[in-house]
Image: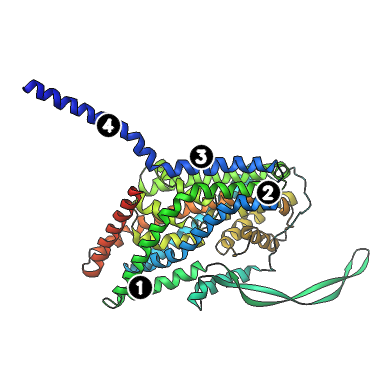
Amino acid sequence: MASGSQSKVTSSDVDDGAERGKSCVPKWFRQNLLVILTLIFGVGFGFLVGFTIRLADPTEEALMWLGLPGELYMRMLKATILPLIVSSVIAGTASLDPRSNGRISVLCLGYIIVTNAIGAAIAVIVSLIIKPGSNQEIAADMSKPDTKNLQTEDIFADLIRNLFPDNLVAAAFQQSQTKYHLVSERVITVNISGGIINETEAVYSRSLGVSSGTNILGLILACTVMGMAASKCEDIGKPFLKFFQSTCDVMIKVLRWIVWYTPIGVASLIASSVAKAKDIDTAFTSLGMFVLTVTVGMAIHQMILLPLAYFALTRKNPLAFLFSASRVWMTAFGPPSTAVSIPEQLRCLEDKNDISLKVTRFVVPFAATLNRDGSCLFITVTAMYIGQLEGHTDAGKIVMIAILATVGSLAIPSVPSASIVTLLILLSSLNIRAVNIGLILAVEWYTDRIRTTSNSMSCLLCAVFTYRFSAKLLSTHGQQGGDDAGSGVTVTMNNEKERSLDTKL
């Protein structure tokens, strides 16, 4: 009997072990199914379809239908970003005291300024080594984006104005932007070698206008103030905070549904961008060294600098961190948009890396608005490339390019080809001709995507950095008792809730 009983137990154990062995692969596959689908179908299939359709010389109607699934994906994500940011910032800041909020803000802003400068430094080093503009011919400009006659001071003035919106409802769909209107034209006499000629000069009038697009920076500041005020109102403010905490949970649930549409949306966006890009062969042939320089710079930033910084901060495996951020990378690469990747950034930080909601709900939207490592790197490389074409390679010009790119990246205007607009203003400040801009625009579909992924990945590290140096203060604040202790418990419960939701999906 004992022997038979023992035999049965052993058989059962073997069966259980075999069952566990069989379930390991499906479980891993299920947990990473979205990443696999997005990588293979979204990115791989998207490029394949895009380059294949280009050979058939598609019509405008065909391109429209090809890009429609991606457009719907973008519309759904954009519809959820505003309520998610507003509710998460209010709920997050309400659990902090003013001292914690101030420390988090300073750490976040300091990280952004330093890393933007590091991006410029990487660009300068890579450009001096590869020298993309050396021994290259200057091509005629094909086209230039409309800079709206913007000046450097206009961009920074608009940034400050948008920090303090005068209408919170209007800030949800528009932001302040300086505009120039043609007033008149006048004839001026110019004395050049060979004679005197008359030229026509346009006279513009500056005025304050608006442009379409969510004023995320202004909403973040306003919601931060409202969250802090609600926390001070104690019992009166509790219904207000519960509403926004509930809104945040609901929006995250909606985003969990939308995210499964990512492979189709990314495939459509990439295929459409590749199919409609003009003269890809010519652009890559003429700008081969330039594209190589940008790609190498972004690779160093994402694959070397950020992992090393993560390891220095946490003493954890940076490869695991990069893998946990794969969905963030692909979400940013497809649209391309740092703001669109905000939901995935929150998921990555809170569910995969156990970063407190007190930090992520403020830092992620703030960093997504101002953190521009990739854009700064791109602007610097492009300015160096054009400077080498024009022969402006002295040390003084190089230092000025890096400084202006770092400062200018903090206030990139909300206009199409925004980084190109900032680049043109930078070149104008240094009296460098904007040559080859047309060809640079021809590869914008590629460079825009890789610099957006660098921006998004750096936003993740910004939250890790901020949490690393504010964790003790948050812990002290959470142990003070009363509402503060309750806040800490709420954060822990919310993190567990998010992980539970993700596991169910």
Q: Secondary structure at mark 1?
A: helix
Relative horizontal placement of residue 198, taking residue 23 as reference (left or right): right
Task: Say which residue appears at 66% left-offset and 54% top-offset.
Answer: 383
Measure how far apart labels 3 and 2 are at the Cα level: 22 Å
Are there few (<14), some (14-19), or many (20+) residues within 10 Å of tag 1? many
Q: Secondary structure at mark 4?
A: helix
Task: Say which residue appears at 49% left-offset and 63% top-offset.
Answer: 79
Q: Quadrant of residue 375?
A: bottom right
Label 3 vs 2, first from the N-terminus: 3
Q: Amino acid at mark 2?
A: Ala
| Farthest-out residue, left | 1
Task: Say which residue appears at 64% left-offset and 45% top-offset.
Answer: 291
- Viewer-proximal residue among 21 and 158: 21
**Looking at the image, residue 3 lies above or below residue 407:** above
Label 4 vs 2, first from the N-terminus: 4
Measure how far apart labels 1 and 4 are at the Cα level: 52 Å
Q: Secondary structure at mark 2?
A: loop
Q: Amino acid at mark 4?
A: Glu
Asked if the residue at tag 2 contacts the one at tag 1, i.e. Cβ–Cβ closer than 8 Å, the answer is no
Q: Quadrant of residue 415?
A: bottom right
Q: Is residue 164 visible?
A: no
**Pointer 4 residue:** 19
| Farthest-out residue, top | 3
Measure how far apart labels 4 and 2 are at the Cα level: 51 Å
**Pointer 3 residue:** 40
Label 3 vs 1, first from the N-terminus: 3
Q: Nearer the viewer, mark 1 or mark 2?
A: 2
Q: How is the image coloured?
A: rainbow
Residue 36's disc number: none
Q: Amino acid at mark 1?
A: Met
Asked if the residue at tag 4 contacts the one at tag 1, i.e. Cβ–Cβ closer than 8 Å, the answer is no
